[in-house]
Amino acid sequence: MKLLNIFKKEPEKKKQRGFKGALKTRFTNWLLNSFTKINVDTKYEFKQLISRVRDLSKNNEVFRSHLNNLEKSIIGKQGFRLQSLVKSDSGELNTAVNDELELAWYDFGKRSNGYITKCRIVWRS
């Protein structure tokens, strides 16, 4: 009987489509359980996030050095600046418009123009 089973054709296994990286296993159960937008997460957990960042910046040397490195290499001494590259119809940079835009950005970013409250920037008119 077993000899005849050798010649039988085995049924094809059902093919499944999907990504194996998206499978939930005992190692990945702690990852995402639901699909929510990042803004929803930060809206409800913003205060806790801010308190953790402040605590880490005071008590953790590694985090403090990361913040210092971020300030030196990314933000810089002058903060974020705008470099306008508006071109005229001929394809050359329009320096008059670019200078005006950069000056308006500089005026917009002054501390006297606004204040930050509850993750919103309120600008005085």
Image (cartoon, rainbow, N blue to C red):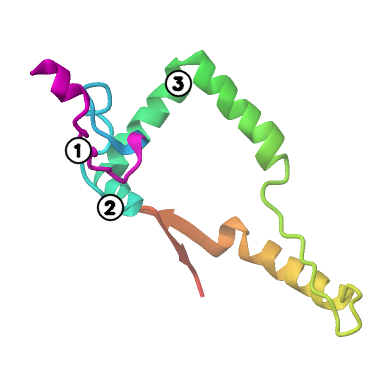
Which circle marks residue 84 in the picture? none
* Measured Cα–Cα span from mark 2 to mark 1: 48 Å
Q: State the CA–CA distance, disc 3 to disc 2.
A: 27 Å
SS at mark 3?
helix
- Element class at badge 2: helix
Above/below status of 104 relative to 19 = below
Which is nearer the N-term, disc 2 or disc 1? 1
Q: Compared with residue 75, is residue 2 higher up or lower down, i.e. above or below?
A: above
Q: Along the horizontal axis of the image, is 14 left or right of 105?
A: left
Question: In the rendered image, which quarter is residue 71 located in?
Answer: top right
Comparing marks 3 and 2, which lies closer to the viewer? 2
Which residue position holds label 1?
Answer: 11
Tell me the crowding category of disc 3: few under 14, some 14 to 19, or many 20 or more residues within 10 angstroms, Cα based.
Answer: few
User: Residue type at mark 1?
Assistant: Pro
From the top left corner, tell me how far across and down residue 125 is, in percent.
51, 75
Crowd class of label 2 (few under 14; some 14 to 19; many from 20; radius 10 Å):
few
Q: Check disc 1 and report its element: helix, strand or loop.
A: loop
Magenta-tinted stretch: 1-20
Q: Nearer the viewer, residue 44 or 35?
A: 35
Which residue is the site of mark 3? Answer: 58
Residue 99 in the image: above or below residue 79: below
Tell me which amino acid carries mark 3: Lys
Residue occupying the point 68% across, 65% down = 105
x, y (%) of residue 74? 67, 39
The residue closer to the viewer here, 49 or 58, is 49
**CA gap, disc 1 and disc 3:** 64 Å
| Residue 40: mark | 2
Q: Residue 124's spot in the image, x, y percent?
A: 49, 70
Q: How far across and down, in percent of the image, does residue 55 sit?
A: 38, 24
Mark 3 near mark 2, Cβ–Cβ under 8 Å? no
Identity of the amino acid at label 2?
Answer: Val
